[in-house]
């Protein structure tokens, strides 16, 4: 169980994305299909609300399965869409992933409660809008109910929650961390020590997502799998692991390990 994490400079944020692209292009269609499956699962609660609990609890399993396929590609193996389901049959880790899903659900409920407290009047005003109201007037009234402090508080709390869960999942599944709380603390530590490269990583992904807007977000089916892969490569680089380094088109495994570019 890791207690020490490596620290990288800002430029490694781009290197991790490059590693994500190299792995993605080795079998792009399969990675796109896996990402689309994850999107479908996340949308299930909106289509059939009774399955909301099932979808939330299944989400960590699909994410861990996606990461597992990255490891298989790093080992030079071919992957299939069915590989994303592997965590559902992985003995010794399924209970921890289930517990992880419960923690995520609990935090999501707390965030919803915070949203209601901070923006309750604005949300109530939106719910009471009738068809005859002027959009400009409604917009102005809603804005008058929202303060910068409320927005800042919600964004800060949500960001902390996202950072706490981001690396906690691979720590639980790949490193065998049994305490979800400890894994979340370690995830926050990773972000604190590697804020520079992770900020670069996030900024580039956000920019790519914005560029997808004029194209009806269709390119996201490529951008997001690369981002997922690159993020997992960052986990391999930061947390001491036994998996092999991600493949590179222009560097040998030995040079990758020593450079830290795709260090696994």
Image (cartoon, rainbow, N blue to C red):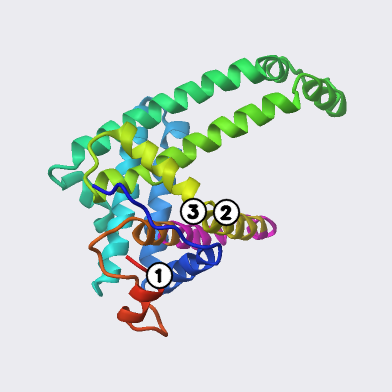
Crowding near pointer 3: few (<14 within 10 Å), some, many (20+)? Answer: many
Residue drawn at x 52%, y 61% is 223
- x, y percentage for residue 216? 64, 55
User: Separation of disc 3 and disc 2 at Cα?
Assistant: 8 Å
Quadrant assignment, res 138: top right
Question: Closer to the N terminus: mark 3 or mark 1?
Answer: 3
Viewer-proximal residue among 226 and 52: 226
Depth check, mark 2 against mark 1: the one in front is 1
User: Separation of disc 3 and disc 1 at Cα?
Assistant: 14 Å
Viewer-proximal residue among 216 and 182: 182
Q: Which mark is residue 194?
A: 3
Quadrant assignment, res 200: bottom right
- Asked if residue 179 lies left or right of residue 199, the reply is left
- Write the start and end of the magenta stretch as one range: 211-229
**Can you identify the residue that label 2 sits on?**
199
Secondary element under disc 1, as helix, strand or loop, is: loop
Residue drawn at x 50%, y 59% is 221
Depth check, mark 3 against mark 2: the one in front is 3
- x, y percentage for residue 165? 41, 39
Crowding near pointer 1: few (<14 within 10 Å), some, many (20+)? Answer: some
Q: Which mark is residue 260?
A: 1
Secondary element under disc 3, as helix, strand or loop, is: loop
Tell me: residue 236, above or below residue 55.
below
Question: Closer to the N terminus: mark 2 or mark 1?
Answer: 2
Crowding near pointer 2: few (<14 within 10 Å), some, many (20+)? Answer: some
């Amino acid at each position: 169980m890791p207690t020490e994490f490596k620290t990288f400079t800002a430029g490694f944020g781009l290197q991790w994305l490059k590693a994500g692209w190299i792995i993605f292009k080795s079998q792009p269609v399969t990675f796109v299909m896996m990402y689309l499956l994850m999107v479908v699962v996340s949308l299930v609660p909106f289509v059939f609300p009774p399955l909301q609990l099932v979808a939330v609890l299944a989400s960590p399993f699909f994410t861990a399965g996606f990461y597992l396929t990255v490891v298989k590609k790093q080992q030079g193996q071919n992957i299939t869409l069915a590989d994303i389901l592997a965590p559902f049959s992985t003995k010794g880790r399924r209970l921890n992933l289930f517990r992880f899903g419960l923690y995520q659900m609990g935090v999501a409920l707390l965030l919803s409660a915070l949203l209601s407290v901070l923006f309750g009047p604005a949300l109530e005003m939106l719910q009471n809008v009738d068809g005859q109201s002027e959009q400009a007037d409604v917009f102005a009234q809603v804005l008058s109910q929202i303060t910068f402090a409320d927005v800042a508080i919600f964004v800060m709390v949500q960001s902390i929650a996202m950072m706490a869960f981001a690396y906690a999942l691979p720590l639980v599944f790949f490193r065998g961390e049994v305490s979800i709380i400890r894994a979340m603390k370690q995830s926050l530590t990773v972000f604190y020590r590697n804020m520079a490269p992770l900020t670069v990583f996030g900024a580039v992904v956000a920019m790519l997502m914005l560029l997808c807007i004029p194209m009806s977000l269709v390119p996201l089916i490529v951008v997001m799998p690369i981002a997922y892969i690159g993020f997992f490569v960052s986990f391999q680089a930061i947390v001491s692991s036994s998996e092999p380094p991600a493949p590179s088109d222009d560097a040998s495994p030995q040079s990758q390990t020593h450079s830290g570019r795709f260090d696994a």
